[in-house]
Image (tube, rainbow, N blue to C red):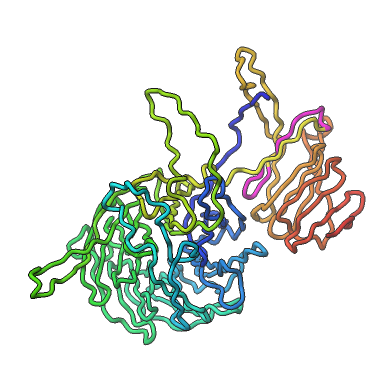
Amino acid sequence: MPIYRNSSIDWKPSPVVALATSADDSQVAAAREDGSLEIWLVSPGTSGWHCQLTVHGDPKSRISSLVWCHAGKMGLPGGRLFSSSIDGSVSEWDLYDLKQKIVLQSIDFSIWQMAVAPSNSSLMHAVTNSDHIGNGYLNDKSNDSDDHETSESENDSDSDELHEQSVVEDRRVALACDDGCVRIYRITDSDELIYHRSLPRVSGRVLSVTWSADGNMLYSGSSDGYIRSWDAKLGYEIYRITVGLGGLGSGPELCIWSLLSLRCGTLVSADSTGSVQFWDSRHGTLLQAHSFHKGDVNALAAAPSHNRVFSTGSDGQVILYKASCESIGPNDGLSSSEVIKKWIYVGSVRAHTHDVRALTVAVPISREDPLPEDKVKRSRGREKPIDFSYHKWAHLGVPMLISAGDDTKLFAYCANEFTKFSPHEICPAPQRVPIHLVHNTIFSHTSLLLVQYSCRLDILSVRLENNVESRSSSGGHASTSLLVQVKSKASRKIICSTISNSGMLFAYSDHVKPSLFELKKGKVGQGEWIINKRQLPRKLQFAHSMIFSYDSSQLIIAGHDRRIYVSMFSLIEFHFLF
């Protein structure tokens, strides 16, 4: 079958602004700049990575961060997903009804980041094993025995490590706010966040926040170059750290974009000077400082064992730092030597072409893709064939790092062997433009193409230009011309759309209701094309998906209320309801 090419469709995928991993580590949520949220299944197989669902949120509310916490006694295993916005509101994402629910109305100040406190009630200890699913990982199946990379060849207690899991009641969430306050709310089973307390206001904006492993301490980073340690129960400041002292910037020139608290008591900071610093969280003293980034460091993440830390930023790099223990003092057996932990730079990977804004760590728990029975024979040549190494490290229970940013793509890395294997591109073509092509329409058998954009529909006529000179599979070029353009009411985001085989009817749905239109060719002197709006039943719910029947006599709608509606155009009522 010949292939025709056309470049008239405007494809502009939206950047990823935040990532979060589900409570059972099986899913990754990616929030985009246009207000949409994607849920990706974490998979060890290359074909298993797929977008399970997309929730179209409010495009006017810019998401600043995501948190995914345990659901408590009742709820899905993946937990509950929340997002904060620059407009000062907090939303919960209903992954069953596919909608965004506001659980905290705007506080009149931007929320830059959220952090959920670990629960310290009813702690249960669990020892990891090969079938463990969660924050304990066993990676002995993924590591090759002939690993020569000493900086990453050790398992570093990622296997058989003792972790604490909790039976969750009410959870606390801290909000880093633009007015200089850290506000703490409680997550309950209700549809609202319950206000708990506010920490004293500081100079500058609070840009980052994180909890200690026991949930008793809270750390905040501000635009004034300070990291502050807080008593989460009593709400007073314990100490503050001047991050820019002796660095590349200080005071109002330095922003603390991300903080990470490790179980060993180390606090990690990432700032606008390109520095990643490791601090003793008990005393606030500097342990290690690295400045390998060439711009702002936007995000931090840690491996499950908390002995590896990843950073990323505006230079597109993802950098790995690894904990290394050293002994200081006499070693004669009479005196005890002091063991100190250092954080060394291991290496970097640059898979993204633009700023990287978010990092998260997840674990595949779905089945693996079967390996091919017959080995593929590689032809000899000067150029080395591309090495698809994803299957060498992506296995069940092996942690992987996920990154995303302004280039709209998502990449997966091996968290245990970061520099040994190339990253895997999860989504090569993000947010593909929905298109519907119909042939042999009633308009002189002209082919029509329906293109769905965020707030409008374009209907194009398609004309094929055969390539007579070429005998290849390429049929030539397909030229298009715009016939009509329909914009959604009040610039509401379009969820789905469809066009009939006859080309005479087309429909779309936003978050309010579906709409049906009729396309006619105008008479001489009345314009080229005419659009008439057709009436649909008033009680019809907005749709997640829709399609016309083969003979174009019925419109089939998958409604928001989890019902399927079949509407005949001869009657302004439902013909079938499932």
**Horizontal side of residue 434 vs 177, given as left or right:** right
Residue depicted at 48% across the width and 49% down the height? 410
Q: Is residue 384 above or below residue 143?
A: above
Quarter of the image where one finds residue 526: top right
Q: Split into 4 quadrants, where in the image is the N terminus?
A: top right
**Horizontal side of residue 13 vs 305, given as left or right:** right
Residue depicted at 86% across the width and 40% down the height? 551
Q: Position of residue 81 (x, y in %)?
A: 55, 67
- Whether residue 232 is visible here, answered yes or no, is yes
Q: Is residue 32 above or below residue 422?
A: below
**Horizontal side of residue 34 vs 348, given as left or right:** right
Near-viewer residue (321 or 158): 158
Task: Residue lying at the far right in this picture: please name it.
Answer: 570
Quarter of the image where one finds residue 541: bottom right
Q: Is residue 179 above or below residue 489?
A: below
Q: Look at the image and give the residue range highlighted in magenta.
A: 442-457
Near-viewer residue (41 or 291): 41
- Whether residue 87 is visible here, answered yes or no, is no
Residue depicted at 88% across the width and 50% down the height? 568
Near-viewer residue (381 or 485): 381
**Horizontal side of residue 524 vs 435, given as left or right:** right
Residue depicted at 8% across the width and 75% down the height? 334
